[in-house]
Image: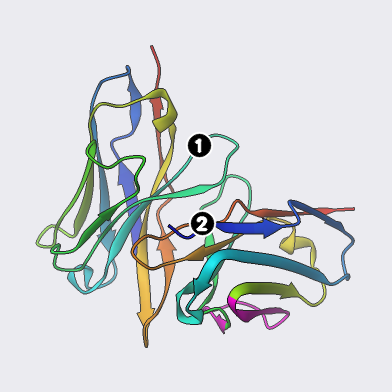
Amino acid sequence: EIVLTQSPGTLSLSPGERATLSCRASQSVSSSYLAWYQQKPGQAPRLLFYGASSRATGIPDRFSGSGSGTDFTLTISRLEPEDFAVYYCQQYGSSFTFGPGTKVDIK
Amino acid sequence: EVQLVESGGGFVQPGGSLRLSCAASGFTFSSYEMNWVRQAPGKGLEWVSYISGGGTTIYYADSVKGRFTISRDNAKNSLYLQMNSLRAEDTAVYYCARVYSVWGSRGFDYWGQGTLVTVSS
C-alpha cells in the first residue's frame, strides 16, 4: 500500500507570501493518479488538481501543482485570505489514499 | 447543478449497524464512479470505499473490509454504505464523493455535505 507523507504539518505565512507544500509517496505514483484538495473548517473538501498538475474547474491560477514519481508539490504563488486552509494530497491506484494534510495558517 | 446529499447518520452503540445513503442529482449518476470518504473529529480524510458506475468493481479500505458494504441503485440515483459491527473508531463525518475522470486522471470533484456517525456506549 502506498503511504503519502505531507510536509510541513503546519505552514505559518502572511497574505501575499508564497506557499510551497510537499507530498511524498512511499513508492512511485503515476502523475495521472495524484490529486490535491483544499478543506476549510466545517466544509467538504474541494478538488484543486487532478493528474498532479491539471487545475480543476474554477481554481485560480495562483495555485499550481507539479511533480512526478514520489515527490509532488502544491504551490500558492501569493496567498489570499481565503487560501488559509488544510491541503491534502491523494493517490489513486487500487485504493485512494490521502496524505495527513498540511495546514496553512495566518502568521 | 450537481448535488450529493448524504443521510442516515446518527448515534449507535458499538457492534451496531447503520446504513448511509447519498442522493445524487444534476448528472447522469450511472456514468460516474463514486466513493465514501470519512473524517474523524479533528482528523484528516480517510478513504473508505469505491464503486464503479455499474457497480461491478468495488474496493474497501483495510480498516472497514468485511464490515462495510458499498452499493448503488442507478435507477434511484443513490449510493449506499451499509456499516455493520461498528466500532468507536468509526466515529466520523462520512462524505460521498463523485469521481471526475479524464484521460485516466482522476479526482473527487463533487462532495456531499457529510453525515455524522457517532459510535459510543
Nearest to the observer: residue A42 or residue B57: B57
- Please determine whether, in this image, residue B18 is positioned above or below residue B70: above
- The residues bearing labels 1 and 2 have C-alpha atoms spaced at a distance of 14 Å
- Quadrant position of residue A87: bottom right
Residue B1 visible within the image: no
Residue pointed to by mark 2: A98
Residue A81 visible within the image: yes
Q: Position of residue B15 (x, y in %)?
A: 27, 20
- Please determine whether, in this image, residue B25 is positioned above or below residue B85: below
Nearest to the observer: residue A90 or residue A15: A90
Residue pointed to by mark 1: B40
For disc 2, the chain is: A
| B46 part of magenta stretch | no
Residue type (three-letter) at the residue carrying disc 2: Phe
Give the class, few, some or many, for how many residues have Cα within 10 Å of label 2's Cα (few <14, many ≥20): many
Q: In the orientation shown, which residue stands out farthest toward the bottom?
A: B103
Residue type (three-letter) at the residue carrying disc 1: Ala
Q: Position of residue B105 (x, y in %)?
A: 42, 80
| On-image quarter of the N terminus of chain B | bottom left
Left or right: A52, with B76 as reference point:
right
Nearest to the observer: residue A56 or residue B54: B54
| On-image quarter of the C terminus of chain B | top left
- For discs 1 and 2, the disc positioned in front in the rendered view: 2
Q: Position of residue B23 (x, y in %)?
A: 25, 53
Left or right: A57, with A38 as reference point:
left
Which stretch appears magenta? A54-69
Give the residue displayed 22% in from the left and 30% down from the top. B84
**Model colouring:** rainbow
For mark 2, give the secondary structure. loop
Q: How many marks?
A: 2
For mark 1, give the secondary structure. loop
Left or right: B121, with A66 as reference point:
left
